[in-house]
Amino acid sequence: MELSDRKKIILSAIVEQYIRTGEPVGSKSLLSVLPMSLSSATVRNEMAELADMGYLEQPHTSAGRIPSNKGYRYYVDNLIDHSALDEVQKKQIESCVLESSKDPDKIIEHASEALADITNCAALSTAPTVTGSTVTRIELVPIGRRTAMLVMLTSKGLIKSRVCRADGDITAEVVEKFYNIASASLIGTSLDEISLATMQTLAASVSEEIFTMFSLLAAVSELAHDASRSDVILEGQSNLLNHRELESNTYELMEFLRKGDAIKSLVKAADGKDLNVLIGKEAQYKQLEKSSLILSKYNINGNDGGIIGVVGPTRIDYAKLIPSVKYLTELVGKLLTQALEE
């Protein structure tokens, strides 16, 4: 059933006042913030009807009303502007991540940290998706007689690096042969096709340096394995302690987030959607019944990248946080695209 304009205004005012104060909203306090002149009796009747329709709840007999999950859902879907972000807010977000714009590894990490600080919620993020990803570049930089830095770049914009130790000297000849193998057999190869057995076969092609080469190629295999993992990075979990409505299950929620498996499944379900807002029981996990998640997808070169989002109480400021999360993910996508083109 579609709500009347008056009910929409009253529902919006209740949601926003409850988000602001955390206290149940009564008809008298509502009268002072409504943009129209209504009697107290009319407001009470409208609130009673909204409650009957499932948009409001009454926590105690004598208390005012608070939004239900259904009320929040209607508010998010119909009553706020998802693009409402002013220039000051945009610059605040930009200042937090632009300093890392030349380092793809740091862009997502700094974006999550910034989001946790800005929202006072827990922030989560994933690296660019690796489904269908191939190796586009491998760098080998000797840093010692038997040690080198390996850097791998994938077609989806993911960069992985590690220091490896070889079983022999990393000479100029070894480096040249490594690049020949990489160029002929690794560049353009799908990540899931790179295995230790494959690396062993490739190393055997240079019999005189087989042990040194296998050490380096085994490290490439480990990088490919690391790149294939879809870990969820969490920042600002301690922010959840600042929300009194989560007090009864804060530590249970933090442990739930730390374990990560359920969050990974939620992130995976959200992949492909530009924005996904899950409110309370919509997430279908008991630990999240008092929480909401805002998940937004970033793109790299027009392709699906990863997810950035926040976890907080259902009483989060959706009108502010949804545009902030969306703008941040757009910015991350642009920065990653630029960094990978340079």
Image (spheres, grey):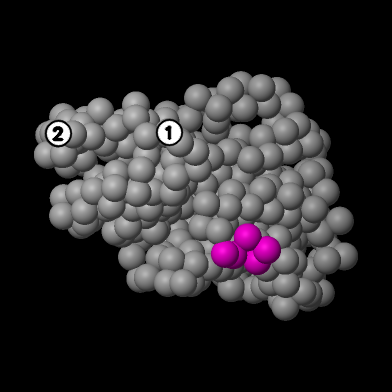
Q: Which residue is mark 1?
A: 146
Q: CA distance from mark 1 to mark 2?
A: 18 Å
Taking 335 as reference, is 196 above or below it? above
Q: Amino acid at mark 2?
A: Ser
Q: Position of residue 173 (x, y in %)?
A: 29, 47
Q: What segment is highlighted magenta in the picture?
A: 98-102
Quarter of the image where one finds residue 318: bottom right
Q: Earlier in the sequence, mark 1 or mark 2?
A: 1
Residue 207: image tag? 2
309 or 201: nearer the eye? 201
Q: Label 1: few (<14), some or many (≥20) within 10 Å?
A: some
Quarter of the image where one finds residue 170: top left
SS at circle 1: loop
Q: Amino acid at mark 1?
A: Arg
Residue 247: image tag? none
Residue 71 falls within the magenta-colored stretch: no
Whether residue 1 appears in this view of the structure is no
The residue that appears at 63% across and 40% down in the rendered structure is 235
Q: Position of residue 314 (x, y in %)?
A: 63, 43
329 or 277: nearer the eye? 329
Question: Is residue 76 left or right of 262 when viewed as pictured?
Answer: right
